[in-house]
Image (cartoon, rainbow, N blue to C red):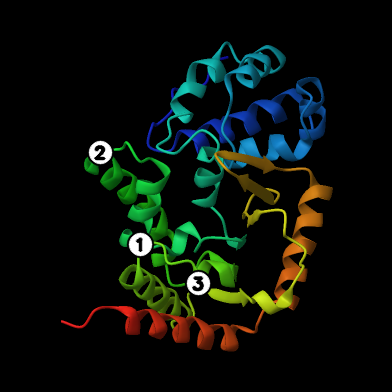
Amino acid sequence: MPGPKDLDPSSPRELIGAELRHARRRKGFSQTELGAPLFVSGSFIGQLEAGTRRMQREYAVQLDEILETDGFFTRHCATSAKSRYPDHFEEAAEAEAVTTAIRSYNPLLIPGLLQTPAYAAELFRTYRPMASDAQVEELVTIRMERARLLDDPTKPLFMTVIDEAALRRPVGGPAAMSQILRHVADLMRRRRVIAQVLPFAAGAHAALGGALKLMEFPDGPPLCFLEGLDTGKLVDDPATVARHALTFTLLQTTALSPAHSLDLIEAVAQDYEHEQPRS
């Protein structure tokens, strides 16, 4: 029997996933049965097959042995591991690119997919005070390329709850803040995003612990990404994902309606504009 063909590097994850599905079925394993000796869930195997998660070398070696694929996954897992993102975020960013729906909450910042260059540049200068202008520019370019995900007029569905603190903290000064808030308002008016503001008056809420992102996929189970300071965890456990989906629903019920949120965002943008020096 001929061995697997080499991969087309233009989409290595999807091709590795397709090969994994083929090899698993050829051996007669379910996703759960294949996951058991790797100590991962059937959902995790499904995400590998759908290309929403990266093939790590430790799993590749074991899969080659179990599925008798003559080193195929070990040879090609390095190709799928190339990333422009920080280690703690790389899997989440790459999964984000193939989602059908995203639901996010951020307690302190405007979400990355909604950021403008000036806002993002100020964040990167603050995070990395020793970075050169060229390095900051490269980081901003990568973030703006991520934001192009929203250029498609129909997908993914993007829903976000933004804490009022993110509106009030003047990242980059009044000009940068008025620009980004007008940008968010424009996306809302064009019905490209559904955004709600969680006001200070709401008091305690279900996500005081930190940022949350839920992602859905056409050919795989949902994922949840939990993020902290230079840390991040991509969660696939169905019970945990369901619990955090409930968290997001509770945030939506506590937040202002989209219409009232738009009014607040535009009002705060106008306040920043009044702070700008007159020419």
Q: Which of 70 and 74 lies nearest the eye of the viewer?
A: 74
Q: Give the amino acid at mark 3.
A: Leu
Residue 2 showing in the rendered view: no
Q: Give the amino acid at mark 2.
A: Ser
Q: Which of 167 and 13 lies nearest the eye of the viewer?
A: 167
Residue located 69% across and 18% down the image: 67
Residue 102 showing in the rendered view: yes
The C terminus - image quarter: bottom left
Residue located beneath label 3 in the image = 167
Circle number at residue 49: none
Check the image and name the residue furthest to the left: 279
Mark 1 closeness class: few <14, some 14–19, many ≥20 residues within 10 Å: some
C-alpha gap between disc 3 and disc 2 = 28 Å
Q: Give the amino acid at mark 1.
A: Gly
Residue located 61% across and 15% down the image: 69
Per the image, label 3 sits on a secondary structure element best described as helix
Mark 2 closeness class: few <14, some 14–19, many ≥20 residues within 10 Å: few
Mark 3 closeness class: few <14, some 14–19, many ≥20 residues within 10 Å: many
Per the image, label 1 sits on a secondary structure element best described as loop
Residue located beneath label 1 in the image = 172
Residue 241 vertical placement versus 2 (above, below)? below
Indicate the position of residue 126 as horizontal and vertical percent values.
Answer: 39, 48
Residue located beneath label 2 in the image = 132
Is the residue under label 3 in contact with that under label 1 (CB below 8 Å)?
Answer: no
Q: Quadrant of residue 92?
A: top right
